[in-house]
């Protein structure tokens, strides 16, 4: 009977996930719904286990309507959902607690390992002091320019920023320990890691925060071995309250460095010290890192930073201009944002390049000059047609503001333009129906399918509409090629 009940629970939740998967992006599905486990089903009440309080609150805030819809579809009008939350702050128990329970919950015991003891009786050598040189500033090694105030939030990084801010307000006291930030080059991992450290320093002045790139960590360890002081090296890092290691993937294949980091990690984690890591890949995709380390990376939260959408790219450029006291015409800012879509560092570099050239040549900044500079800046980059790019071409063609295209207005000319943007996005990009709908004002995948069918039907019956498609196809291909 128990096995039958478990089977029913899993089947019900599996069916719920099918509906949810069609209405969220693949990345959001992987982040928020894959970790959920169905627990029990009793009298139309489905209980699911979520990994943390933060995940529970995020689901309630952003996906409650979708969850309610899926539950009603599977269990009928009387269907209800309850949560069981694993709390990981305390390492003395493995019992989850229910949302409505007044009792405090505790989290999983994390396979404790014997850590190297820290001795405070002898002077420990600081690896940040180079013999023969003055002492390097080791208060934090944080860059004050990389603050939360200068970090632009968007859909591409909202989870990572939210988790980072939670850690900054309660270092070592959340379930996000370690917090691993991962993503491609130039997407803001290092900036966010510094921002968390700066915020912790502001909130907890008595805590020792240290930022160190993984290659420097390794070189310091090599020097410590040469100087017969590896224990001093380990003890120094074990005294940190917050340790931030950038580009942890750099340790791949470095067995001895990984071994010493393993002991440092264990000591800090078991003493509720906060660990923050950055990587170019998710833990599951890291090669050359020992399995015992990878399993520990998965204890907390792995949050990815994706390529920024158009609105976020424009906001980043405007913030950069504001900080540097620069003013540029809106059309130039938008052109830069449309042209460089995948890398924030390149985005800001293009802006600096344009400003530098106009300053050196003493020429006014024009759209034509910006186009020439951008073409040189990205000439070696292989461009993919994006949803943002298609929407710009469609809006320019019909002389519509982008905000109108994404609005809920049902005016005929706007609906027609929106449907064409959806049609070309489906045929010319690899984006999912849900992603296309999200870019077009939060529409669902069914609306995108309907739009594509409508466009195909009008192509066969309306010559004027067929002309629109032909013109837009030429503009998209021509501008993309140029």
Image (tube, rainbow, N blue to C red):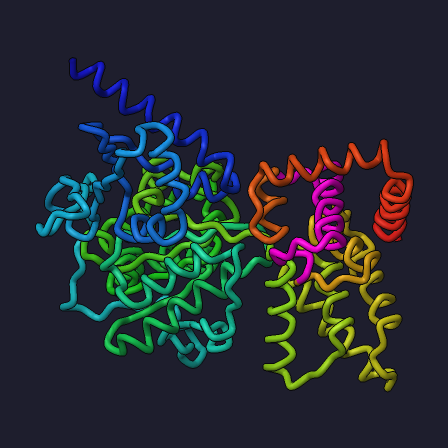
Please tell me which residue lies in front, 157 or 134. Answer: 157
Please tell me which residue lies in front, 87 or 247. Answer: 87
Q: Is residue 72 visible?
A: yes
Say which residue appears at 42% left-offset and 77% top-offset: 136
Residue 180 image offset from top left, x and y in percent: 40, 51
Say which residue appears at 32% left-offset and 69% top-offset: 209
The correct choice, above or below, for 137 with respect to 115 in the image is: below
Q: Magenta part of the protein: which range?
A: 404-432
Query: In which quadrant is the N terminus drawn?
Result: top left
- Is residue 422 on the magenta stretch? yes
Q: Which corner quadrant of the image does residue 165 belong to?
A: bottom left
Task: Name the side, left or right, on which 323 lies relative to 236.
Answer: right
Say which residue appears at 32% left-offset and 30% top-offset: 76
Task: Name the side, left or right, on which 43 lies relative to 62.
Answer: left
The correct choice, above or below, for 358 with respect to 310 in the image is: below
Say which residue appears at 60% left-offset and 69% top-offset: 316
Task: Name the side, left or right, on which 197 lies relative to 100.
Answer: right
Residue 166 image offset from top left, x and y in percent: 32, 62
- Is residue 99 on the magenta stretch? no
Residue furthest left as drawn:
103
Residue 23 image offset from top left, x and y in percent: 50, 39
Across the whole image, how many numbered discs are drawn on residues? 0
Q: Is residue 176 visible?
A: no
Task: Name the side, left or right, on which 61 lies relative to 333.
Answer: left
Q: Which corner quadrant of the image does residue 8 belong to?
A: top left
């Amino acid at each position: 009977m128990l096995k039958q009940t478990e089977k029913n629970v899993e089947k019900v939740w599996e069916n719920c996930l099918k509906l949810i998967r069609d209405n969220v992006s693949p990345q959001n599905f992987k982040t928020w719904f894959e970790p959920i486990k169905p627990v029990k089903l009793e009298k139309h009440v489905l209980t699911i286990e979520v990994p943390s309080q933060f995940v529970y609150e995020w689901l309630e805030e952003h996906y409650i309507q979708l969850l309610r819809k899926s539950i009603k579809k599977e269990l009928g009008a009387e269907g209800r959902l309850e949560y069981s939350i694993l709390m990981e702050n305390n390492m003395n128990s493995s019992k989850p607690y229910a949302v409505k329970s007044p009792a405090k919950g505790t989290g999983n015991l994390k396979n404790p390992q014997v850590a190297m003891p820290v001795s405070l009786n002898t002077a420990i050598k600081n690896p940040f002091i180079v013999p023969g040189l003055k002492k390097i500033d080791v208060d934090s090694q944080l860059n004050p320019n990389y603050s939360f105030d200068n970090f632009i939030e968007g859909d591409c990084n909202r989870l990572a920023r939210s988790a980072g801010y939670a850690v900054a307000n309660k270092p070592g006291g959340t379930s996000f320990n370690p917090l691993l930030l991962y993503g491609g080059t130039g997407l803001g991992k290092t900036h966010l890691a510094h921002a968390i450290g700066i915020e912790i320093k502001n909130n907890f002045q008595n805590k020792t925060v240290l930022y160190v790139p993984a290659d420097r960590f390794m070189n310091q360890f090599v020097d410590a071995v040469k100087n017969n002081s590896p224990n001093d090296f380990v003890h120094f890092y074990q005294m940190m309250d917050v340790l931030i290691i950038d580009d942890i993937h750099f340790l791949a294949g470095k067995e001895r460095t990984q071994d010493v980091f393993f002991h440092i990690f264990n000591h800090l984690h078991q003493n509720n010290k906060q660990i923050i890591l950055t990587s170019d890949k998710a833990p599951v995709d890291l090669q050359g890192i020992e399995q015992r380390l990878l399993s520990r990376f998965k204890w907390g939260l792995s949050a990815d930073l994706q390529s920024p959408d158009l609105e976020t790219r424009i906001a980043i450029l405007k913030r950069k201009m504001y900080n540097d006291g620069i003013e540029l015409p809106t059309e130039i800012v938008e052109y830069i944002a449309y042209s460089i879509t995948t890398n924030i560092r390149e985005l800001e570099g293009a802006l600096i390049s344009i400003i530098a050239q106009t300053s050196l040549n003493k020429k006014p900044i024009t759209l034509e000059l910006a186009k020439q500079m951008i073409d040189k800046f990205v000439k070696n980059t292989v461009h993919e047609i994006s949803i943002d790019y298609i929407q710009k071409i469609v809006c320019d063609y019909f002389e519509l503001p982008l905000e109108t295209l994404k609005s809920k207005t049902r005016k005929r000319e706007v609906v027609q333009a929106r449907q064409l943007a959806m049609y070309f996005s489906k045929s010319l990009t690899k984006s999912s129906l849900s992603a296309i709908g999200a870019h077009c004002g939060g529409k669902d995948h069914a609306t995108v399918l309907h739009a594509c069918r409508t466009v195909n039907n009008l192509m066969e019956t309306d010559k004027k509409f067929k002309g629109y498609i032909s013109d837009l196809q030429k503009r998209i291909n021509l501008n993309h090629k140029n």
